[in-house]
Image: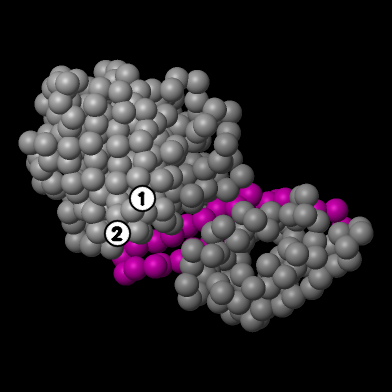
């Protein structure tokens, strides 16, 4: 992988009198459009040019790019065509139409006004949008850190899901921090906190916006290919190696990530272990009968079991019990939001360890998906009227 960000040559000016023609593998185009789709704005976007796919032939391959102004995703199809200049194609109909195609190849031809598409007997003609300059994110400089795709995918799966739609802007992203031999991926919405840690010799401190995390997750595969990150003062960049390389650019989030370590209790009075899948099934059944607005359930941690209770004034009540080990003789009951609890539990296979102090303290779930790696999930307690 190169040590600098992918630089794009200047666009060529197409000859409006001569149609551009190209034939490329349909599977390549469909995949490239799927890869750039996280950067497409919604239908409510006012600026029409943002709701478009930018297509351009470069020496390195056919460039497919989408950007909503805050994030840009570029996929590079390894094909050399005779397309000249830039095609700015409205994304909704182009993406939807190509997605539904079946076949081996697709033919494109364009003038300065329209692009014509053909795949087998399916044909379409779509008006082009006037091309505008690409959003600028600057250059990323030297590579800050490199991961294997399989490893980063695991880190993001466990550590980058607890953020929510909050007014506090920095909560709409995940913290990527590597120092002192450990990398951490952290996310929170103020009600729960996810932390995944693994060994890592490098250093980085970056806030990954949600859109960038989504684009990275959808672009990676379970391979040994590399993923690299770079930063400058205003932007963060991600290069994903593949047969169709992906380059993601995003503006950095402002502000600082919350001091998440402050919510971690210094010590615990109780620790109890149970099977995550069994607890998920029990919690789901109780939540179905319980209050759907508050999503409140009560977990009672006993010596050799965990009791789950839910109730609703109109729907009734439900009680479950799952086997556990390591508890104490004095049970403690903690109210929790069932959705928040399930969001963490469903990521765990095998055993999960609970650390508990009192009904008013945060509950910590701990699992070890891989040797030397740890998933911690902290859920704040919920007051439940008895």
Q: Which residue is mark 2?
A: 103
* Quarter of the C terminus within the rendering: bottom right
* Mark 2 neighbour class, 10 Å CA radius: few under 14, some 14 to 19, many 20 or more: few
User: Residue 315 placed where, x, y %?
Assistant: 88, 63
Image quadrant where residue 329 sits? bottom right
Q: Secondary structure at mark 1?
A: strand
Q: Which residue is mark 1?
A: 122
Answer yes or no: is residue 117 visible.
Answer: yes
* Mark 1 neighbour class, 10 Å CA radius: few under 14, some 14 to 19, many 20 or more: few
User: Residue 113 placed where, x, y %?
Assistant: 30, 23
Q: How far apart in space, not on screen, are marks 2 and 1 (Cα)? A: 10 Å
Answer yes or no: is residue 237 visible.
Answer: no
The part of the chain drawn in magenta is 360-386
Q: Which residue is depicted at the point 45% across and 20% down?
A: 47
Q: Does residue 366 belong to the magenta stretch?
A: yes
User: Residue 228 placed where, x, y %?
Assistant: 21, 44
Q: Are marks 2 and 1 in contact (CB under 8 Å)?
A: yes
Image quadrant where residue 357 sits? bottom right
**Does residue 272 appear left or right of residue 203 in this picture?**
right
Q: Which residue is depicted at the point 92% across and 59% down?
A: 314
Which dot, 2 or 1, sits closer to the camera? 1
Q: Is residue 292 above or below residue 323?
A: above
Q: Secondary structure at mark 2?
A: loop
**Does residue 91 appear left or right of residue 192 in this picture?**
left
């Amino acid at each position: 992988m190169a040590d600098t960000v992918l630089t794009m040559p200047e666009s060529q000016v197409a000859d409006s009198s001569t149609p551009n023609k190209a034939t490329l593998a349909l599977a390549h185009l469909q995949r490239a459009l799927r890869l750039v789709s996280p950067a497409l704005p919604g239908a409510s976007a006012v600026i029409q040019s943002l709701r478009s796919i930018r297509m351009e032939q470069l020496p390195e391959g056919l460039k497919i790019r989408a950007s909503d102004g805050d994030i840009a995703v570029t996929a590079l199809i390894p094909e050399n065509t005779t397309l000249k200049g830039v095609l700015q194609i409205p994304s909704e109909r182009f993406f939807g139409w190509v997605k539904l195609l079946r076949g081996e190849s697709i033919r494109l031809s364009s003038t300065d006004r329209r692009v014509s598409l053909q795949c087998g007997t399916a044909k379409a003609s779509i008006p082009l949008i006037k091309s505008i300059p690409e959003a600028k994110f600057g250059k990323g400089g030297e590579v800050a850190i490199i991961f294997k795709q399989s490893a980063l995918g695991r880190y993001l799966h466990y550590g980058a899901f607890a953020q929510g739609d909050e007014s506090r802007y920095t909560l709409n992203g995940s913290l990527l921090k590597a120092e002192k031999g450990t990398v951490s991926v952290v996310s929170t919405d103020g009600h729960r906190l996810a932390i995944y840690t693994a060994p890592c010799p490098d250093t980085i401190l970056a806030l990954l916006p949600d859109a960038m995390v989504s684009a990275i997750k959808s672009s990676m595969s379970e391979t040994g290919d590399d993923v690299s990150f770079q930063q400058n003062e205003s932007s963060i960049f991600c290069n994903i190696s593949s047969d169709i390389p992906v380059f993601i650019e995003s503006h950095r989030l402002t502000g600082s990530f919350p001091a998440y370590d402050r919510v971690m209790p210094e010590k615990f009075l109780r620790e109890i272990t149970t099977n995550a899948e069994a607890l998920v099934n029990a919690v789901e059944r109780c939540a179905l009968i319980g209050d759907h607005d508050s999503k409140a359930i009560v977990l009672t941690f006993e010596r050799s079991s965990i009791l789950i209770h839910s109730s609703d004034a109109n729907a009734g009540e439900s009680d479950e019990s799952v086997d556990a080990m390591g508890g104490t003789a004095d049970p403690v009951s903690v109210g929790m939001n069932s959705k928040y609890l399930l969001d963490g539990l469903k990521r765990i296979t095998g055993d999960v360890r609970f650390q508990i102090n009192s009904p008013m303290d945060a509950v910590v779930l701990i699992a070890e998906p891989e040797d030397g790696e740890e998933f911690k999930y902290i859920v704040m307690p919920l007051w439940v009227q008895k």
